[in-house]
Amino acid sequence: MSAESQAKATPPSTPERIGTIASLRRILPYAKPAMPRIYLGMVSALIAAIVALLIPQVLRSLVDGPLKSGDASQIWWPVAAVLGLGVLEAVMIWFRRFFVLQPGTAVEADLRNSLYRQLQDLPVGFHDRWPSGQLLSRVLSDLNLIRRWISFGSVLLVVNVITIVVGFVFLLSINWILGVVFVVCSIPLWIYGYLFEQKYSVVARRSQDQAGDLATAVEESVHGIRVLKAFGRGQYALKNFAKQAEQLRGTEIQKAQAIAGIWLWLLLVPDVTFALCLLGGVWLAAAGQLTVGALVAFFATATVLRFPVESIGFLLSMTFDARTATDRFFEVMDEENTITSPQHPTSIAKPEGRLVFRDVHFRYQDSPAKYPDLIDGVDLELEPGETMAVVGLTGSGKSTLTALTTRLYDVTGGAILLDGVDIRDLALVDLRAHIAMAFEDATLFSASIRDNVMLGRPDGTDLELREALDIAQADFVFDLPFGLDTKVGEEGLSLSGGQRQRLALARAVAAKPDVLVLDDPLSALDVDTEALVEAALRRVLASTTALIVAHRPSTVMLADRVALLENGRITAVGRHSELLVSSDHYRFVISSLEDEERREQRESEVNA
């Protein structure tokens, strides 16, 4: 596991948790459209529960009436009443399922869409800190837990608690002595339920976080499968995965033990209560203080209450799981989006493509104060139609500088101006229409070649698509099985590195921006293909402002001027020939680039 992936193995520390009820109430704005049906489901379930509690009262009148007197003619109406109540209970249970089934899925879909929208809006800095597996587990498993609780757990929890209270009233009305015994014996359940929340909530949170870490490990292994196989490190990855899986298994066992503990009480206490009430009931009946019908009704009512009492255990665990899932959901939703469009954005009437860096500073949010800024006071001007190459040693800040142009990160000092307008005063969608980027690490999506290339210009024509492919020397797409409609595999891994880079370059060119920012977009190309791409790029760069991070001397030759970046600062700007004469550090950087290019060329010849 890389240092970066280790740093992202767990999400950032979470704020102090609020109470369970307060936490779950935060879902209400999303659940509000579904609440009418949820309430109808609760009412249906409550009617079913009350009907079930009425049946013992009918049995009481049956035992103390017709059965005691032996009058068979009076039996039919209690039997019909029991049958009718039973049918009504079944119908109400059907209505409960009918009402709650659909709205829960609608709430889950709304939550998932909101979370995905938030993930799209949050800045790149957020995604640098958060592991993808943690986000994936929130989008899938956590929202599934919330949906199940809304549709099932919340309804039954409310209804069963009301049923228990009403049932206690029925028991007390039948015989207050036995009713008091029943109520007193249930007190340990409520005490243990409180203790259960304190223990289970912590373990449930740990389980869901570890599940997210495990998802991250799987994703990294799948994406890095070629590396693992090439270096024979499959067993190493398996060992790390097994260690994480064992930790999750141990946590799940702790959860199971906590649930088993409350189930012990939920099963033991009612049985002990039944035994005590049976002993007391028989004694009261023998003493003539309780009729047989009342005794039958008491135990029939207690039997009806048995499921609501026993269900409290798994309903509480479901509630605490949902509470944890809700906390995890809002950890993402509460993240502040620091890179947003201004409330009153400015527009550029006649875009020219003049790009100016004015005393630009940048440092990462969690960077220690003792370290200097990564971009430390850059001043640079690109005239409309000018091509500027940025060169520097590894770690000098070249890629970071290009990322600031489209506000993937925001400057922490100074300003970047596009045609005289601070880019922070532009709407993000407008800014990213004016400036397009092609990255060294070309990312493609599981979509067709056409959709990938025209991502930044979905309304573009086929002629513009073919022109962009021609400039990027990506004519290989026409030899694919379905041509432009060939679906690219996940992240484009079905293509070679050079093919991915050419499609990414075509995507940037097809967007027809005013400013084209290229972060070493030709690094994976062979020398011959690179020469063809550079020749074609000259046509585009003749009328487009371009900022190019160059890792090869041949790429530098594309530029009108070159900026030398050293330790986050521009230390020299000029033509390539001028800097070769005036700057020792520039000569050293170019020499390093030439050595690297010769090495790559030798490797290419050997592989050929």
Image (spheres, rainbow, N blue to C red):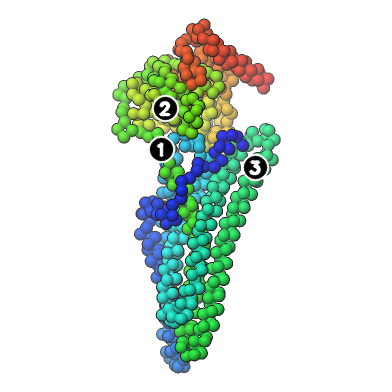
Mark 2 falls on what kind of element? loop
Cα gap from disc 2 to disc 3, whole angstroms: 38 Å
Q: Nearer the viewer, residue 406 or 316?
A: 316
Contact check, label 2 and label 1, Cβ < 8 Å: no
Is 424 on the left-hand or right-hand side of 517?
Answer: left
Mark 1 falls on what kind of element? loop
Q: Does residue 484 appear anywhere in the picture?
A: no
Amino acid marked by disc 1: Asn
Mark 2 highlights which residue?
A: 411
Mark 3 falls on what kind of element? helix
Q: Quadrant of the N terminus?
A: top right
Mark 1 highlights which residue?
A: 337
Q: Residues within 10 Å of mark 1 (few under 14, many from 20)?
A: some
Mark 3 highlights which residue?
A: 240
Question: Residue 479: x, y in percent?
Answer: 56, 28
From this view, report whether residue 84 is shown above or below residue 122.
Answer: below
From this view, report whether residue 509 is shown above or below residue 39.
Answer: above
Q: Nearer the viewer, residue 299 or 17?
A: 17
Question: Residue 434: x, y in percent?
Answer: 38, 25
Disc on the earlier residue, 2 or 3: 3
Question: Residue 98: x, y in percent?
Answer: 42, 62
Amino acid marked by disc 2: Val
